[in-house]
Image (cartoon, coloured by chain):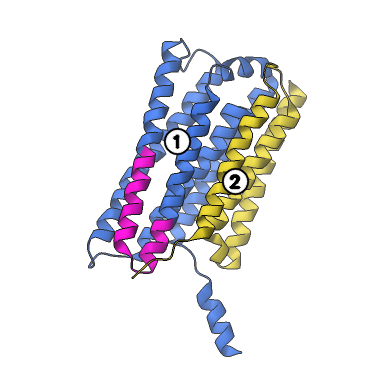
């Protein structure tokens, strides 16, 4: 009985540092406030927002979402590989994650350039003010994510530095960037 | 140490990708009518919240975390949902 209780205790663990979880929950609340303002104004003037939304290419949004989900899958594999000591596989997964993030950034910049070229700047309508603000702030989080991935690579490359807790903490940050995009994508590209 | 391929993570990605592709179908089903649609908006938000919960549980390993973190992240998903729907409904009412 005692053995079983011990086994159950070992089976559960907090992935990464608790501080990162506090950050994740706080950041989610901040973004929820942004989303709330966006939905409030969108519901008040739906035609204006629908007209702006019609300028977006849903296919780019879907593609970028799939790429970012791939990066999250890759980071999840990295954590599991590092946990069992397969550090070469873990490093490969971090590089795949960084490649996915670079693809996402490229298409995001491509989309911004296309919109601006067509006269849809940050101040052209309320929709585009929210669009550039939300995608821009997410872009910054993704850039910070590159630093975070660099920390994982730095950790994994040397046996003396390896810390599973730090790898999990960095992965938690990366997944947060992913699920924030899941919400941003749904609210900017698909809602009616 | 040889690493066994984790099929569960692959299945999770396929489910998340399918939900994402479902948006294309939703968009196609209302195409041509650039009109507000509360049913579409609600469905899209609910799907996004389900995706967020799956990411929490599977990719972020909350499934294996202590009950407190499981409940906290579930409560957060509900909180996001309540926040989004409240703002949307208030906007509709005042619009």
Q: Which chain is yellow?
A: B
Residue identified by numbered label 2:
B51
Q: Nearer the viewer, residue A51 or A83?
A: A83
Q: Is residue B30 above or below residue A29?
A: above
Q: Residues within 10 Å of mark 1 (few under 14, many from 20)?
A: some
Q: Can residue A45 be seen in the rendering of this structure?
A: no
* Residue shown at the point (71%, 30%) measured from the top left: B40
Q: Which residue is pictured at 38% across the width and 54% down the height? A: A170
Give the percent coordinates (x, y) of residue B32. Answer: 68, 16
Q: Position of residue A126 (x, y in %)?
A: 56, 18
Of residue A34 and residue B59, the one placed in the foreground of this image is B59
Image quadrant in which you'd find residue A159:
bottom left
Q: Main secondary structure of the magenta part?
A: helix
Residue A67: which quarter of the image? top left
Q: Quadrant of the N terminus of chain A?
A: bottom right
Q: Chain of mark 1?
A: A
Quarter holding the C terminus of chain A is top right
Q: How many marks overall?
A: 2
Stretch in magenta: A77-101
The answer for how far apart the CA atoms under marks 2 and 1 are is 18 Å
Secondary structure beneath dot 1 equals helix
Badge 2, how many Cα within 10 Å: few under 14, some, many 20+?
many
Residue under the point 54% across and 16% down: A55
């Amino acid at each position: 009985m005692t053995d079983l209780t011990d086994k159950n205790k070992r089976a559960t663990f907090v992935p990464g540092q608790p501080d990162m979880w506090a950050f994740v929950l706080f950041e989610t609340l901040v973004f929820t406030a942004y989303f709330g303002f966006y939905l409030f104004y969108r519901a008040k003037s739906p035609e204006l927002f629908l007209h702006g939304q019609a300028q977006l290419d849903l296919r780019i949004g879907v593609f970028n979402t799939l790429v970012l989900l791939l990066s999250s899958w890759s980071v999840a594999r990295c954590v599991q590989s590092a946990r069992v000591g397969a550090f070469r596989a873990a490093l490969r997964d971090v590089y795949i994650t960084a490649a996915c993030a670079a693809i996402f950034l490229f298409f995001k910049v491509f989309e911004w350039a296309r919109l601006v070229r067509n006269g849809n700047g940050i101040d052209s309508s309320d929709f585009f003010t929210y669009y550039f603000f939300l995608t821009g702030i997410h872009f910054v989080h993704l850039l910070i994510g590159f630093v975070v991935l660099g920390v994982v690579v730095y950790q994994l490359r040397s046996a003396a530095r390896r810390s599973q807790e730090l790898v999990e903490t960095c992965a938690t940050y990366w997944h947060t960037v992913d699920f924030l995009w899941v919400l941003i994508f749904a609210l900017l590209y698909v809602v009616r | 140490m040889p690493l066994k391929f984790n099929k569960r993570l692959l299945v999770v990605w396929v489910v998340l990708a399918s939900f994402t592709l479902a948006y294309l179908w939703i968009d196609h089903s209302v195409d041509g009518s650039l009109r507000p649609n509360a049913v579409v908006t609600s469905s899209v938000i609910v799907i996004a919240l389900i995706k967020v919960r799956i990411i929490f549980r599977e990719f972020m390993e909350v499934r294996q975390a202590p009950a407190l973190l499981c409940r906290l992240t579930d409560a957060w998903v509900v909180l996001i949902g309540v926040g989004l729907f409240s703002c949307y409904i208030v906007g509709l009412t005042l619009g």
